[in-house]
Image (cartoon, coloured by chain):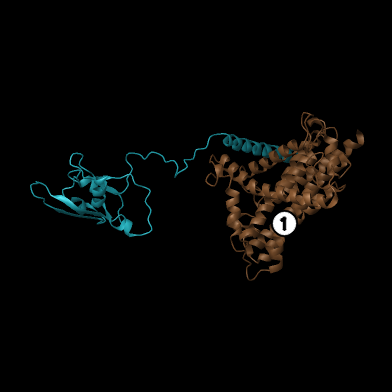
Chain colours: A brown, B cyan
Amino acid sequence: MTLPEPWRLLAYWVGILGFVGLNAAYLVWVERKAAGRFQRRPGPTEVGPGGLLQPVADALKLLSKQVLVPPEADRFLFRLAPLLVMAPALICLAVIPFSATLGARDLHLGLLLVFAFGAVNVLALMLGGWASRNKYSIISAARVVSQNVAYEVPMLLVVVTLLMITGTANLREIVEQQTGGFWRWNLLRLLSNPLMPVTFLIFFICLLAETNRAPFDMAEAESELVAGAFTEYAGMSFGVFFMAEYANIVVGCAVATVLFLGGWDSPIGIGSGLFWFLLKMYLLIFTVIWVRWTFPRTQFYRLLNLSWKILIPVSLGTLMLTAVMLKIF
Amino acid sequence: MVRALRELWTGFKSLCVGMGITLRQFFRPTVNVPYPHRTLPIPPRYRGHIVLVRDPQTGRSLCIACKSCEKACPSDCIVVEGIKREGEKRKSVTEFKLDFTRCSLCGSCVEVCPVDAITFSKRYNLASTTKTAFYQIDLYQELLEEGKK
Protein backbone atom coordinates (compact mmCIF):
# COMPACT_ATOMS: atom_id res chain seq x y z
CA MET A 1 0.00 0.00 0.00
CA THR A 2 1.32 3.42 -0.88
CA LEU A 3 0.01 6.51 0.86
CA PRO A 4 -0.80 9.66 -1.17
CA GLU A 5 2.03 12.17 -1.29
CA PRO A 6 1.68 14.67 1.60
CA TRP A 7 0.57 11.92 3.99
CA ARG A 8 3.47 9.69 3.05
CA LEU A 9 5.92 12.46 3.91
CA LEU A 10 4.18 13.10 7.20
CA ALA A 11 4.12 9.40 8.07
CA TYR A 12 7.81 9.18 7.21
CA TRP A 13 8.74 12.08 9.46
CA VAL A 14 6.65 10.93 12.37
CA GLY A 15 7.73 7.32 12.00
CA ILE A 16 11.45 7.95 11.58
CA LEU A 17 11.61 10.62 14.27
CA GLY A 18 9.73 8.37 16.66
CA PHE A 19 11.91 5.40 15.82
CA VAL A 20 15.16 7.33 16.20
CA GLY A 21 14.00 9.10 19.35
CA LEU A 22 12.86 5.91 21.02
CA ASN A 23 16.00 4.05 20.02
CA ALA A 24 18.37 6.82 21.05
CA ALA A 25 16.68 7.12 24.44
CA TYR A 26 16.32 3.43 25.17
CA LEU A 27 19.61 2.27 23.69
CA VAL A 28 21.25 4.41 26.37
CA TRP A 29 19.26 2.41 28.90
CA VAL A 30 20.13 -0.88 27.15
CA GLU A 31 23.78 0.12 27.05
CA ARG A 32 23.85 0.94 30.75
CA LYS A 33 21.99 -2.24 31.66
CA ALA A 34 24.25 -4.34 29.45
CA ALA A 35 27.37 -2.66 30.78
CA GLY A 36 26.13 -3.50 34.24
CA ARG A 37 25.52 -7.13 33.36
CA PHE A 38 28.96 -7.46 31.77
CA GLN A 39 30.46 -6.16 35.00
CA ARG A 40 28.00 -8.17 37.12
CA ARG A 41 26.14 -5.10 38.36
CA PRO A 42 22.39 -4.56 37.95
CA GLY A 43 22.73 -1.22 36.11
CA PRO A 44 20.17 1.57 36.65
CA THR A 45 17.39 0.40 38.97
CA GLU A 46 16.07 3.44 40.81
CA VAL A 47 13.99 5.46 38.33
CA GLY A 48 10.91 3.44 37.45
CA PRO A 49 10.70 -0.35 37.34
CA GLY A 50 14.10 -1.71 36.39
CA GLY A 51 15.32 1.82 35.74
CA LEU A 52 13.04 2.06 32.69
CA LEU A 53 12.32 5.75 33.26
CA GLN A 54 16.02 6.61 33.45
CA PRO A 55 16.15 8.02 29.87
CA VAL A 56 13.18 10.27 30.69
CA ALA A 57 14.91 11.54 33.81
CA ASP A 58 18.14 12.11 31.87
CA ALA A 59 16.31 13.97 29.11
CA LEU A 60 14.46 16.20 31.59
CA LYS A 61 17.72 17.01 33.34
CA LEU A 62 19.45 17.87 30.05
CA LEU A 63 16.49 19.94 28.86
CA SER A 64 16.43 21.99 32.04
CA LYS A 65 20.06 23.02 31.67
CA GLN A 66 21.24 26.13 29.94
CA VAL A 67 22.80 25.76 26.49
CA LEU A 68 26.04 27.65 26.94
CA VAL A 69 28.13 28.96 24.06
CA PRO A 70 31.72 29.70 25.08
CA PRO A 71 32.57 33.38 24.49
CA GLU A 72 35.49 32.66 22.14
CA ALA A 73 33.61 30.07 20.10
CA ASP A 74 32.33 30.40 16.57
CA ARG A 75 28.67 30.84 17.50
CA PHE A 76 27.13 29.77 14.20
CA LEU A 77 29.18 26.61 13.67
CA PHE A 78 28.91 25.74 17.35
CA ARG A 79 25.12 25.75 17.14
CA LEU A 80 25.09 24.09 13.72
CA ALA A 81 27.17 21.04 14.64
CA PRO A 82 24.57 19.19 16.77
CA LEU A 83 21.97 19.61 14.04
CA LEU A 84 24.39 18.43 11.41
CA VAL A 85 25.28 15.33 13.37
CA MET A 86 21.65 14.31 13.85
CA ALA A 87 20.23 15.07 10.41
CA PRO A 88 22.21 12.51 8.33
CA ALA A 89 21.04 9.64 10.52
CA LEU A 90 17.42 10.66 9.91
CA ILE A 91 17.99 10.98 6.17
CA CYS A 92 19.75 7.61 5.93
CA LEU A 93 16.83 5.83 7.55
CA ALA A 94 14.59 7.05 4.71
CA VAL A 95 16.01 4.50 2.28
CA ILE A 96 16.26 1.54 4.67
CA PRO A 97 13.67 -1.12 3.76
CA PHE A 98 12.39 -2.34 7.12
CA SER A 99 10.21 -5.01 5.58
CA ALA A 100 8.79 -5.95 2.20
CA THR A 101 6.09 -3.33 2.64
CA LEU A 102 7.64 -0.84 5.07
CA GLY A 103 10.13 1.72 3.86
CA ALA A 104 9.96 5.47 3.37
CA ARG A 105 11.55 5.84 -0.05
CA ASP A 106 12.58 3.23 -2.58
CA LEU A 107 15.61 4.96 -4.05
CA HIS A 108 17.57 3.19 -6.74
CA LEU A 109 20.85 4.63 -5.44
CA GLY A 110 19.93 4.05 -1.81
CA LEU A 111 23.30 2.59 -0.86
CA LEU A 112 25.11 5.62 -2.23
CA LEU A 113 22.81 7.93 -0.29
CA VAL A 114 23.50 6.11 2.96
CA PHE A 115 27.26 6.38 2.58
CA ALA A 116 27.17 9.96 1.28
CA PHE A 117 25.17 11.17 4.26
CA GLY A 118 26.96 8.86 6.66
CA ALA A 119 30.15 10.81 5.96
CA VAL A 120 28.50 14.08 7.04
CA ASN A 121 28.62 12.81 10.60
CA VAL A 122 32.40 13.27 10.53
CA LEU A 123 32.08 16.80 9.22
CA ALA A 124 29.69 17.65 12.03
CA LEU A 125 32.02 16.31 14.72
CA MET A 126 34.91 18.19 13.17
CA LEU A 127 32.91 21.45 13.04
CA GLY A 128 31.81 21.00 16.63
CA GLY A 129 35.37 20.42 17.78
CA TRP A 130 36.74 23.28 15.75
CA ALA A 131 34.06 25.79 16.71
CA SER A 132 34.43 25.08 20.44
CA ARG A 133 37.86 26.71 20.45
CA ASN A 134 39.10 24.32 23.06
CA LYS A 135 42.38 22.48 22.71
CA TYR A 136 40.89 19.11 23.56
CA SER A 137 38.08 19.63 21.09
CA ILE A 138 40.49 20.52 18.31
CA ILE A 139 42.70 17.48 18.98
CA SER A 140 39.57 15.38 18.97
CA ALA A 141 38.39 16.94 15.71
CA ALA A 142 41.73 16.16 14.05
CA ARG A 143 41.56 12.59 15.30
CA VAL A 144 38.00 12.12 14.08
CA VAL A 145 38.92 13.23 10.60
CA SER A 146 42.01 11.06 10.20
CA GLN A 147 40.24 8.08 11.77
CA ASN A 148 37.22 8.37 9.53
CA VAL A 149 39.26 8.93 6.38
CA ALA A 150 41.22 5.81 7.24
CA TYR A 151 38.13 3.68 7.83
CA GLU A 152 36.03 5.07 5.01
CA VAL A 153 38.41 3.36 2.55
CA PRO A 154 38.03 -0.29 3.63
CA MET A 155 34.33 0.23 4.24
CA LEU A 156 33.74 1.47 0.72
CA LEU A 157 35.95 -1.30 -0.69
CA VAL A 158 33.70 -3.79 1.08
CA VAL A 159 30.65 -2.06 -0.33
CA VAL A 160 32.16 -2.15 -3.84
CA THR A 161 32.73 -5.90 -3.39
CA LEU A 162 29.12 -6.27 -2.47
CA LEU A 163 27.93 -4.10 -5.35
CA MET A 164 29.83 -6.31 -7.80
CA ILE A 165 27.94 -9.33 -6.48
CA THR A 166 24.49 -7.79 -6.26
CA GLY A 167 24.72 -5.55 -9.31
CA THR A 168 22.38 -2.98 -7.80
CA ALA A 169 22.55 -0.13 -5.28
CA ASN A 170 18.86 -0.32 -4.45
CA LEU A 171 18.64 -1.58 -0.90
CA ARG A 172 15.24 -3.20 -1.46
CA GLU A 173 16.53 -5.16 -4.44
CA ILE A 174 19.61 -6.20 -2.48
CA VAL A 175 17.37 -7.70 0.20
CA GLU A 176 15.05 -9.31 -2.36
CA GLN A 177 18.01 -11.11 -3.90
CA GLN A 178 18.75 -12.66 -0.51
CA THR A 179 15.27 -13.91 0.42
CA GLY A 180 14.57 -17.60 0.92
CA GLY A 181 16.63 -18.80 3.89
CA PHE A 182 19.90 -17.96 5.53
CA TRP A 183 22.03 -19.85 2.99
CA ARG A 184 21.05 -17.21 0.44
CA TRP A 185 22.19 -14.24 2.54
CA ASN A 186 25.15 -12.24 1.27
CA LEU A 187 27.07 -13.28 4.37
CA LEU A 188 27.14 -16.87 3.07
CA ARG A 189 27.43 -16.29 -0.67
CA LEU A 190 30.64 -18.25 -0.71
CA LEU A 191 30.42 -19.06 -4.41
CA SER A 192 30.89 -15.40 -5.38
CA ASN A 193 33.41 -14.74 -2.64
CA PRO A 194 34.73 -17.46 -0.33
CA LEU A 195 35.87 -14.76 2.10
CA MET A 196 32.42 -13.22 2.57
CA PRO A 197 32.38 -13.64 6.41
CA VAL A 198 35.72 -11.82 6.53
CA THR A 199 34.22 -9.06 4.42
CA PHE A 200 31.36 -8.78 6.89
CA LEU A 201 33.83 -8.62 9.76
CA ILE A 202 35.70 -5.79 8.06
CA PHE A 203 32.43 -3.99 7.51
CA PHE A 204 31.55 -4.41 11.18
CA ILE A 205 34.95 -3.13 12.38
CA CYS A 206 34.64 -0.12 10.10
CA LEU A 207 31.14 0.43 11.43
CA LEU A 208 32.54 0.64 14.97
CA ALA A 209 35.22 3.09 13.84
CA GLU A 210 32.84 5.22 11.78
CA THR A 211 30.40 5.63 14.64
CA ASN A 212 33.28 6.41 17.04
CA ARG A 213 32.44 3.51 19.31
CA ALA A 214 34.85 1.85 21.70
CA PRO A 215 37.46 0.48 21.15
CA PHE A 216 37.81 3.21 18.52
CA ASP A 217 36.29 6.09 20.51
CA MET A 218 39.22 8.37 19.82
CA ALA A 219 36.91 11.36 19.44
CA GLU A 220 35.57 11.11 22.95
CA ALA A 221 38.61 9.64 24.70
CA GLU A 222 37.52 10.78 28.15
CA SER A 223 40.76 9.78 29.85
CA GLU A 224 42.83 11.88 27.45
CA LEU A 225 40.59 14.56 25.98
CA VAL A 226 37.96 15.26 28.69
CA ALA A 227 35.03 14.69 26.33
CA GLY A 228 36.76 15.45 23.03
CA ALA A 229 34.63 17.37 20.59
CA PHE A 230 31.77 17.54 23.11
CA THR A 231 33.78 19.21 25.88
CA GLU A 232 32.17 22.64 25.52
CA TYR A 233 28.65 21.43 24.86
CA ALA A 234 26.15 21.65 27.69
CA GLY A 235 22.55 20.66 28.22
CA MET A 236 20.56 19.42 25.28
CA SER A 237 23.18 20.34 22.66
CA PHE A 238 25.31 17.64 24.27
CA GLY A 239 22.21 15.47 24.47
CA VAL A 240 21.75 15.72 20.71
CA PHE A 241 25.32 14.54 20.12
CA PHE A 242 24.66 11.68 22.47
CA MET A 243 21.44 10.73 20.70
CA ALA A 244 23.15 11.02 17.34
CA GLU A 245 25.76 8.48 18.40
CA TYR A 246 23.02 5.92 18.99
CA ALA A 247 21.09 6.99 15.90
CA ASN A 248 24.21 6.38 13.83
CA ILE A 249 24.66 2.95 15.41
CA VAL A 250 21.06 2.14 14.48
CA VAL A 251 21.67 3.25 10.91
CA GLY A 252 24.96 1.35 10.67
CA CYS A 253 23.47 -1.87 12.04
CA ALA A 254 20.41 -1.51 9.82
CA VAL A 255 22.66 -1.15 6.76
CA ALA A 256 24.74 -4.16 7.85
CA THR A 257 21.52 -6.16 8.24
CA VAL A 258 20.36 -5.16 4.77
CA LEU A 259 23.69 -5.77 3.06
CA PHE A 260 24.83 -8.98 4.71
CA LEU A 261 22.10 -10.57 6.82
CA GLY A 262 19.21 -10.63 4.40
CA GLY A 263 17.17 -7.70 5.79
CA TRP A 264 13.65 -8.82 6.65
CA ASP A 265 14.22 -12.37 5.41
CA SER A 266 13.57 -15.17 7.86
CA PRO A 267 16.53 -17.54 8.27
CA ILE A 268 14.31 -20.60 7.92
CA GLY A 269 12.53 -19.30 4.84
CA ILE A 270 9.04 -18.80 6.32
CA GLY A 271 7.46 -15.95 8.27
CA SER A 272 9.64 -13.15 6.91
CA GLY A 273 8.86 -9.63 8.03
CA LEU A 274 9.68 -6.63 10.17
CA PHE A 275 10.30 -8.85 13.19
CA TRP A 276 13.34 -10.53 11.66
CA PHE A 277 14.77 -7.21 10.51
CA LEU A 278 14.53 -5.72 13.99
CA LEU A 279 15.86 -8.91 15.60
CA LYS A 280 18.97 -8.95 13.41
CA MET A 281 19.48 -5.22 13.84
CA TYR A 282 19.22 -5.35 17.62
CA LEU A 283 21.50 -8.38 17.79
CA LEU A 284 24.11 -6.38 15.89
CA ILE A 285 23.56 -3.41 18.20
CA PHE A 286 24.00 -5.71 21.18
CA THR A 287 27.27 -6.90 19.66
CA VAL A 288 28.39 -3.28 19.33
CA ILE A 289 27.67 -2.77 23.03
CA TRP A 290 29.30 -6.08 23.87
CA VAL A 291 32.49 -5.07 22.03
CA ARG A 292 32.53 -1.75 23.84
CA TRP A 293 32.46 -3.37 27.28
CA THR A 294 35.04 -6.00 26.36
CA PHE A 295 37.93 -4.11 24.80
CA PRO A 296 39.82 -1.09 26.09
CA ARG A 297 40.45 1.88 23.81
CA THR A 298 43.28 1.34 21.33
CA GLN A 299 46.08 3.77 20.83
CA PHE A 300 45.74 6.17 17.97
CA TYR A 301 48.61 4.91 15.83
CA ARG A 302 47.40 1.33 16.31
CA LEU A 303 44.01 2.38 15.08
CA LEU A 304 45.54 3.77 11.89
CA ASN A 305 47.84 0.74 11.55
CA LEU A 306 44.86 -1.56 11.73
CA SER A 307 43.16 0.27 8.93
CA TRP A 308 46.08 0.89 6.56
CA LYS A 309 48.07 -2.28 7.20
CA ILE A 310 45.33 -4.87 7.69
CA LEU A 311 41.83 -3.81 6.74
CA ILE A 312 42.64 -2.07 3.45
CA PRO A 313 44.91 -4.86 2.08
CA VAL A 314 42.46 -7.55 3.15
CA SER A 315 39.46 -5.76 1.71
CA LEU A 316 41.38 -5.14 -1.53
CA GLY A 317 42.20 -8.84 -1.56
CA THR A 318 38.55 -9.83 -1.18
CA LEU A 319 37.67 -7.34 -3.92
CA MET A 320 40.12 -8.98 -6.32
CA LEU A 321 39.00 -12.43 -5.31
CA THR A 322 35.36 -11.51 -5.94
CA ALA A 323 36.25 -10.13 -9.37
CA VAL A 324 38.03 -13.37 -10.28
CA MET A 325 35.28 -15.57 -8.90
CA LEU A 326 32.58 -13.61 -10.73
CA LYS A 327 34.53 -13.98 -13.98
CA ILE A 328 35.00 -17.73 -13.55
CA PHE A 329 31.49 -18.70 -12.40
CA MET B 1 53.49 -12.43 4.69
CA VAL B 2 52.95 -15.74 6.46
CA ARG B 3 54.07 -14.24 9.75
CA ALA B 4 51.78 -11.27 9.33
CA LEU B 5 48.84 -13.55 8.57
CA ARG B 6 49.61 -15.74 11.56
CA GLU B 7 49.81 -12.67 13.78
CA LEU B 8 46.47 -11.52 12.40
CA TRP B 9 44.92 -14.90 13.15
CA THR B 10 46.26 -15.14 16.72
CA GLY B 11 45.19 -11.55 17.36
CA PHE B 12 41.70 -12.27 16.09
CA LYS B 13 41.51 -15.43 18.18
CA SER B 14 42.49 -13.57 21.35
CA LEU B 15 39.78 -10.98 20.67
CA CYS B 16 37.23 -13.79 20.38
CA VAL B 17 38.43 -15.27 23.67
CA GLY B 18 37.92 -11.88 25.32
CA MET B 19 34.42 -11.59 23.92
CA GLY B 20 33.68 -15.07 25.24
CA ILE B 21 34.81 -14.15 28.73
CA THR B 22 32.61 -11.05 28.91
CA LEU B 23 29.64 -12.97 27.53
CA ARG B 24 30.04 -15.59 30.24
CA GLN B 25 30.07 -12.84 32.86
CA PHE B 26 26.93 -11.39 31.26
CA PHE B 27 24.88 -14.46 32.10
CA ARG B 28 26.16 -14.91 35.63
CA PRO B 29 24.25 -13.39 38.56
CA THR B 30 25.07 -9.90 39.74
CA VAL B 31 27.12 -9.54 42.90
CA ASN B 32 25.89 -6.13 44.02
CA VAL B 33 24.22 -5.35 47.31
CA PRO B 34 21.84 -2.48 46.49
CA TYR B 35 22.94 -0.52 49.53
CA PRO B 36 20.05 1.50 50.92
CA HIS B 37 17.57 -1.32 50.21
CA ARG B 38 19.71 -4.16 51.48
CA THR B 39 22.79 -4.17 53.71
CA LEU B 40 25.35 -6.77 54.58
CA PRO B 41 25.58 -8.04 58.19
CA ILE B 42 28.17 -6.09 60.17
CA PRO B 43 31.03 -8.21 61.52
CA PRO B 44 30.98 -8.54 65.35
CA ARG B 45 34.33 -6.80 65.77
CA TYR B 46 33.27 -3.71 63.83
CA ARG B 47 34.23 -0.49 65.57
CA GLY B 48 31.67 2.30 65.40
CA HIS B 49 31.80 5.18 67.88
CA ILE B 50 31.56 4.12 71.53
CA VAL B 51 28.28 3.94 73.46
CA LEU B 52 27.39 3.37 77.09
CA VAL B 53 26.26 -0.08 78.17
CA ARG B 54 22.98 -0.39 80.03
CA ASP B 55 22.70 -2.55 83.13
CA PRO B 56 20.12 -5.18 82.13
CA GLN B 57 18.64 -5.30 85.66
CA THR B 58 18.32 -1.62 86.59
CA GLY B 59 18.22 -0.13 83.12
CA ARG B 60 20.80 2.44 84.16
CA SER B 61 24.32 2.94 82.92
CA LEU B 62 27.05 0.73 84.31
CA CYS B 63 29.41 3.69 84.39
CA ILE B 64 30.84 4.66 87.79
CA ALA B 65 32.29 7.98 86.54
CA CYS B 66 35.82 6.94 87.50
CA LYS B 67 37.19 8.97 84.56
CA SER B 68 39.66 6.26 83.57
CA CYS B 69 38.50 6.54 79.98
CA GLU B 70 38.91 10.30 80.05
CA LYS B 71 42.51 9.82 81.13
CA ALA B 72 43.18 6.93 78.79
CA CYS B 73 41.94 8.72 75.70
CA PRO B 74 44.94 9.82 73.62
CA SER B 75 42.92 12.48 71.80
CA ASP B 76 41.02 13.91 74.79
CA CYS B 77 37.65 13.32 73.26
CA ILE B 78 35.76 12.05 76.31
CA VAL B 79 34.28 14.19 79.07
CA VAL B 80 32.75 12.39 82.07
CA GLU B 81 31.01 13.85 85.10
CA GLY B 82 29.34 11.94 87.94
CA ILE B 83 27.76 12.31 91.38
CA LYS B 84 27.36 10.05 94.41
CA ARG B 85 23.68 9.36 94.92
CA GLU B 86 22.16 8.73 98.40
CA GLY B 87 22.24 5.11 99.56
CA GLU B 88 24.53 3.92 96.80
CA LYS B 89 28.06 2.64 97.19
CA ARG B 90 29.25 3.67 93.74
CA LYS B 91 29.20 6.97 91.87
CA SER B 92 26.86 7.27 88.89
CA VAL B 93 27.39 9.14 85.65
CA THR B 94 25.54 12.37 84.90
CA GLU B 95 27.35 13.47 81.78
CA PHE B 96 29.23 11.48 79.12
CA LYS B 97 30.25 13.41 76.04
CA LEU B 98 32.23 12.18 73.03
CA ASP B 99 34.00 14.35 70.48
CA PHE B 100 33.79 12.02 67.51
CA THR B 101 35.55 14.47 65.19
CA ARG B 102 38.81 13.63 66.98
CA CYS B 103 38.22 10.03 67.99
CA SER B 104 40.42 7.53 66.16
CA LEU B 105 38.52 4.49 67.44
CA CYS B 106 41.67 3.18 69.17
CA GLY B 107 39.60 1.48 71.86
CA SER B 108 41.75 2.48 74.84
CA CYS B 109 38.63 3.65 76.69
CA VAL B 110 36.87 0.32 76.12
CA GLU B 111 39.93 -1.54 77.30
CA VAL B 112 40.57 0.55 80.39
CA CYS B 113 37.01 0.65 81.73
CA PRO B 114 36.93 -1.31 85.02
CA VAL B 115 33.18 -2.08 84.83
CA ASP B 116 32.87 -2.66 81.07
CA ALA B 117 30.48 0.26 80.77
CA ILE B 118 31.68 1.27 77.27
CA THR B 119 31.40 -0.71 74.08
CA PHE B 120 31.75 -0.11 70.36
CA SER B 121 28.52 0.58 68.51
CA LYS B 122 27.72 -0.66 64.99
CA ARG B 123 26.77 2.75 63.67
CA TYR B 124 28.24 3.55 60.27
CA ASN B 125 25.43 5.50 58.62
CA LEU B 126 26.47 8.76 60.22
CA ALA B 127 25.55 11.93 58.37
CA SER B 128 24.70 15.41 59.46
CA THR B 129 24.61 18.96 58.15
CA THR B 130 26.14 20.41 61.31
CA LYS B 131 29.49 19.85 62.94
CA THR B 132 27.98 19.83 66.44
CA ALA B 133 26.23 16.55 65.70
CA PHE B 134 29.60 14.82 65.94
CA TYR B 135 31.44 17.37 68.05
CA GLN B 136 29.62 16.62 71.26
CA ILE B 137 27.76 13.35 71.10
CA ASP B 138 25.88 13.16 74.39
CA LEU B 139 26.05 9.45 75.07
CA TYR B 140 24.42 9.71 78.52
CA GLN B 141 21.43 11.55 77.09
CA GLU B 142 21.18 8.90 74.39
CA LEU B 143 21.11 6.18 77.00
CA LEU B 144 18.33 7.92 78.93
CA GLU B 145 16.25 8.39 75.79
CA GLU B 146 16.69 4.78 74.83
CA GLY B 147 15.60 3.81 78.33
CA LYS B 148 12.34 5.75 77.93
CA LYS B 149 11.48 3.74 74.83
Q: Residue at x 66, y 61 (%)?
A: A139
Quick one: quadrant of the C terminus of chain A?
top right
Residue linked to disc 1: A85
* Front residue of this view, candidates A137 and A114: A114
The answer to whether residue A314 of the structure is visible from this angle is: yes
Q: Please indicate whether residue A268 sits to the left or right of residue A221 in the image.
A: right
Task: Residue A325: name its quadrant.
Answer: top right
Question: Crowding near pointer 1: few (<14 within 10 Å), some, many (20+)?
Answer: many
Q: Secondary structure at mark 1?
A: helix
Q: Quadrant of residue A292?
A: top right
As displayed, is residue B100 above or below residue B14?
below
Q: Nearer the viewer, residue A147 or B48?
A: B48
The correct choice, above or below, for A50 with respect to A149 in the image is above
The residue marked by circle 1 belongs to what chain?
Answer: A
Asked if residue A4 lies left or right of residue B25, the reply is right
Residue A320 appears in the picture as rendered: no
Q: Quadrant of residue A285?
A: top right
